[in-house]
Amino acid sequence: MSEGTLYDNVWDRHKVTTLPNGQDQLFIGLHLIHEVTSPQAFGMLRERGLDLARPDLTHATVDHIVPTDDLDRPFENDAAEEMYAELERNLEGVDIDFDDPSSGNQGIVHVIGPEQGLTQPGKTIVCGDSHTSTHGAFGALAFGIGTSQIRDVFATQTVAMEKKNVRKIEVTGELGDDVTAKDVILTIIRRLGTDGGVGYVYEYAGEAIESLDMEGRMSICNMSIEGGARAGYVNPDETTYEWLKQTDEFEDDHERFEELKPYWESISSDPDAEYDDVVTIDCSAIEPTVTWGTTPGQGIGISEAIPEPESLPADKQETARRAQKHMGVEPGETMDGYGIDVAFLGSCTNARLSDLRAGAEIVKGRQVDDSVRAMVVPGSQRVKAAAEDEGLDEVFTEAGFEWRNPGCSMCLGMNDDQLVGDEACASSSNRNFVGRQGSKDGRTVLMSPKMVAAAAIAGEVTDVRDLPKAEVKA
Amino acid sequence: MSDEKEIPTVTHVEGSGLPIRGNDIDTDQIIPARFLKLVTFDGLGEFAFFDQRFDDEDNPKEHPFNEDRFQDSNVLVVNANFGCGSSREHAPQALKRWGIDAIVGESFAEIFAGNCLALGIPTVTADTETIETLQAWVDENPDGTIEIDVAEETVSYDDETIDANVDEAQRKALVDGIWDTTALMKSNADAIEATADSLPYIDDSSFQTGRADD
């Protein structure tokens, strides 16, 4: 078993006791909730006559079902309105902070936590959403939980968990031009498999990770779950601290920052920490990466050929055949030139300010292809406002993109933003599962925001490196 | 207050099987997101594997969940990385409400297995060949009985007894009836407070009532 890693250190600090079944009971420092996975847990609480243990450590927003066009209540979609209203009812008379759209702070739960400074190193963070792993970018121990566990956290501010192994993923080398964190994580998942991380927590380390900004680190940690790892993290460093200093929590409270910093440093992985596994990946060779199939592990460089199913490990062949049939791709071809109908720049993976800047840099002065319906869905109201301050909204709308309100949107098609029929979507989201974007015949190609922008312009998947850039930053 | 809920032990599951073949079957396949727009889990059973079971006009397609011979089955037999993807408990809730009491497979995604445990559904594993043999047998014997002994970690059918695996914490939780952990964890209130108290980022370590004063 690992020793002295951030995972071990945070675990030890939060362990309440060992339960009779052998699991540890872990204290939870931050519980994020949203409208889709919390109502049943509130229901269970009422059924059992239990109160919320720590509403002060609980933070709510709405993201999964909110429309991204017309936010006037009641929502046009009755089911969405009912879910929203249920969350409001559950929060009535309860001391839980709620970032609703009128607050200016609403957004995807994994975007708002970090931007407000709720996400901090050494915290345990849970949410009824598998992409909670995102918060690990700050050196938090963060993972998704099911609704019964949400009930447990509501009632006790703890969860029952088994300790996992720790795999250190050392990313060496330097990223090439237009190669981003998204390309790195797609490469990691391709290499280690969609189930390679089961039983593991991933520690991302190495010079390439250290040189990433916080947003890039979040994109990487976000997709840990796509590699089977329930949590992933990066040890906190100066980049982390610089981000934190500018958040609500610390911008006016430098004293608090200095008070907590020793704790943040104390939970970082020791220099002589022991890992259960270490994997090294050289990122210098990574190209802009896209998926050709229907699992996030089915990725390739833009100039690389789609693999013959027979060339893959035995247990991946059938999945590959099914995926190639669904996507309508042939082994031996590249994804360059794969026609798209929709371009989606959004999701908890890639809808932060730097993602929008990266996309804008590509689309500025260009036009979205006539065959493409393109939309930008900023990750939060704050991201949206900051982007508008820089004029990014105009860059996108002038190019033919729709500029929407924040939410999960077309990442999972729970609101009206959905693929229709067998539409193909260049998407900056995290899952290309069949049916994921709202149509069971829909086809999703995962890629970075830059590559989404390039695909929107070209009307097909294309190598962003072939397009000259414009200056968009104010 | 019904805090002290009686939690049943799950030592044996017996019944007929149904096979769902394929690796990496994700939670979007088990229950598509559009069926998550509900504030309870009631009625989710009919939507299990919906997009695999029905075409655009809602006509049934060929799928084990649609076959008459499997309608009374309660042991799902699956392949590798079953339940990968989202944390939605709706996935095991839908399977449970359809009638599934236990799942035997090559491997399971972690959050999915944890969600199953929270509902008292064992997720039992065995190697690829053993699972494929069992799936073939289930196809031939849709009424045949499969017996899962959670405590002994065996799966028996026909004349076979498979030496299977049940995660140790899961096994103990099911066999001892401590898979619903709310009351158990709540009884450690003092230790929870002590832990909170030791964390520099927690200002006030005391349990709160959850209701606003006003």
Image (cartoon, rainbow, N blue to C red):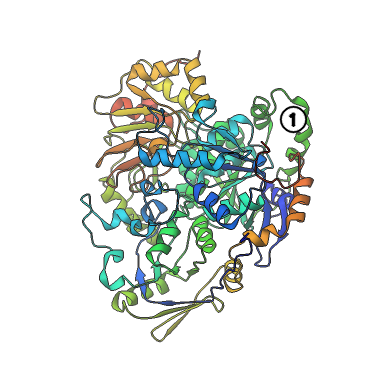
For residue A200, above or below residue A210? below
Tell me: A84 left or right of A373. right
The answer to whether any part of residue A136 appears in the image is yes
Tell me: A278 left or right of B133. right
Q: Residue at x 37, y 27 (%)?
A: A69
Residue B4 point in image, percent of width and height: 64, 64
Q: Dot 1 lies on which element?
A: helix
Residue matched to label 1: A257
Residue A308 point in image, percent of width and height: 31, 52
For residue A419, above or below residue B186? above
Quarter occupied by residue A397: top left
Q: Residue at x 50, y 43 (%)?
A: A223
The chain that hosts pointer 1 is A
Instruction: Please state, as top left, top right, bottom left or bottom right, where the N terminus of chain A lies in the image.
Output: bottom right
Q: Residue at x 23, y 53 (%)?
A: B58
The answer to whether any part of residue A321 appears in the image is no
